[in-house]
Image: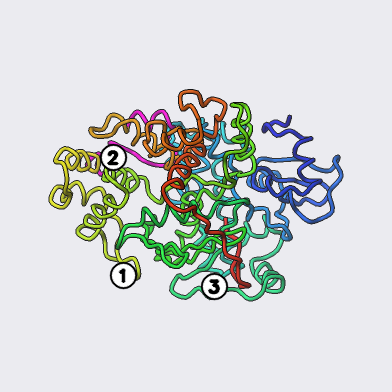
Amino acid sequence: MSAHGLEFERCYRAVTTRDARFDGQFVTAVRTTGIYCRPSCPAITPKRANVTFLPTAAAAQQSGFRACRRCLPDAAPGSPLWNTRADLAARAMRLIADGVIERGGVPALAGSLGYSQRQLTRVLTTELGAGPLALARAHRAHTARLLIQTTRMPMSDIAFAAGFASIRQFNDTVREVFAVSPTILREESRRLRGDTLPATNGMLTLRLPYREPLDAGWLTWFLSSHAVPGLDLWEDGHYTRGLRTPHGQATVRLSVQRGHVRAGLALHDMRDLAPTVARLRHLLDLDADPVGIDEALTAGAAASGRGPIFGSGIRVPGCIDGPELLLRTMIGQQISVAAAATHTARLVEALGEDIGGPVPKLFPTPEAIAEHGGEVLTGPARRTASIVAAARALASGELRLHAGRTAPELRRDLLALDGVGPWTADYVTMRLLADPDVLLNTDLVVRQGATLLGIDLSDTARWSPWRSYLSMHLWKQALAARTPPIRTAPARAARSATVVAR
């Protein structure tokens, strides 16, 4: 066992078999070459005596290793550990991916997590092999590499968009991480992967890889059935919506392909590329380890005396924005999904910000709902009052909804709100924090699915820590009993110059 909790034999076995399931969970640093790779790198397997395994690319960079330009380890799917682990390191990684350090520095990150800067740095260095600044630097290097290889943006603009303080810092970081200058990195990419895509008015087309299998039919149903007119749209296999970003707004268009999600992004400010990609990956649960989850769920079914009863590759949809998730969930309490969409559409039309395009509105801000929601929302007066009160708590900062919260603290704060019961608290916690072990045992549809499969919801410990995924399977089972099975499969990707983005 290494100082960072990595088992050498398990890691080396993954490298010798080039097991892509481990990409993003650790990197292989080769001492003789000074390069670090993803586990599935196609290069010749290094000798055991020459390798060390590190938990993050930042740890490898901190130790003086350069990224392999053949396997692009920073482009691997993100580690599923940041979802399964609820400790400080995992919560910090989620916030770093969302750009908290770029916007507010280490003090903002430490403040969001409720720790001092010294405590935070000590824990991250021990757990992940690098402190918060080094981890943020690795994210900047990844964003820079992505823009260098996929756009025709001038290098000075890329440096600004990736969050570097100066051109010199940008050049030095790229050379240290990739062992070549930014110009050579772009030239190499053109030779190996074709010409770059034009970045016109902030438009980018990216590939967001995921670990297969992926139940595209489930995501299709979830996104299409919850789409709200004017806010988000599912049409011809594409999901389109707008979102607020740290420096403005963006419009995204997503479609599931074999091995990746094709994402079209129109960004108001290119500095928002990295946090936007992180939010899209969270929305679609693209960093999950479906093989490991499926094996655990199958083993749980076998332990209960049943054969295989679940499909493969199901995902737990996340969210784009915490306040939107809570307020939409409260609007939809105790009414049908279709009715919830109607009520939400009315709110969006009246109070949403205009952005134009196929989805012309952004979801209203908590401030707007706190001030005018009572004039627009219909239905029981108590529910309207509860929604407005929740919006007021969000607007004042009394209630904080972000990926750095712990599940117990978040659930406690949600249950303290008038009109929020256990189901709403569990549902929001599951989707906001990507918590893999939330059993929605009070959900009527989940209970129907459990009855159909003969599962006792009072005895589900054998499925821990994957009970969020169990809930999705039960939900899907009940829906399939009402309607024809969802058979949508990922489309085969057309040959293009799109790029892999993490």
Residue 34: percent from left, percent from top: 78, 50
The magenta segment is 392-413
**Given this view, does label 2 or label 1 mark the residue nearer the observer?**
1
Q: Which residue is mark 3?
A: 154
Cα separation, mark 2 vs mark 1, equals 29 Å
Q: The disc labelled 3 sits on which kind of residue?
A: Pro
* Residue 88 visible in the picture: no
Task: Say which label, 1 or 3, has the lower sequence index.
Answer: 3
Quarter of the image for residue 108 reads top left
Q: The disc labelled 1 sits on which kind of residue?
A: Gly
| Secondary element at image label 1 | loop
Q: Which mark is residue 397?
A: 2
Q: Nearer the viewer, residue 332 or 250?
A: 332
- Residue shown at 60% from the left, 67% from the top: 493
- Residue shown at 17% from the left, 40% from the top: 385
Mark 3 nearby-residue class (10 Å; few <14, some 14–19, many ≥20): few
Q: Which residue is mark 1?
A: 356
Task: Say which label, 3 or 2, has the lower sequence index.
Answer: 3
Q: The disc labelled 2 sits on which kind of residue?
A: Gly
Mark 1 nearby-residue class (10 Å; few <14, some 14–19, many ≥20): few
Cα separation, mark 3 vs mark 2, equals 39 Å
Q: Are marks 2 and 1 in contact (CB under 8 Å)?
A: no
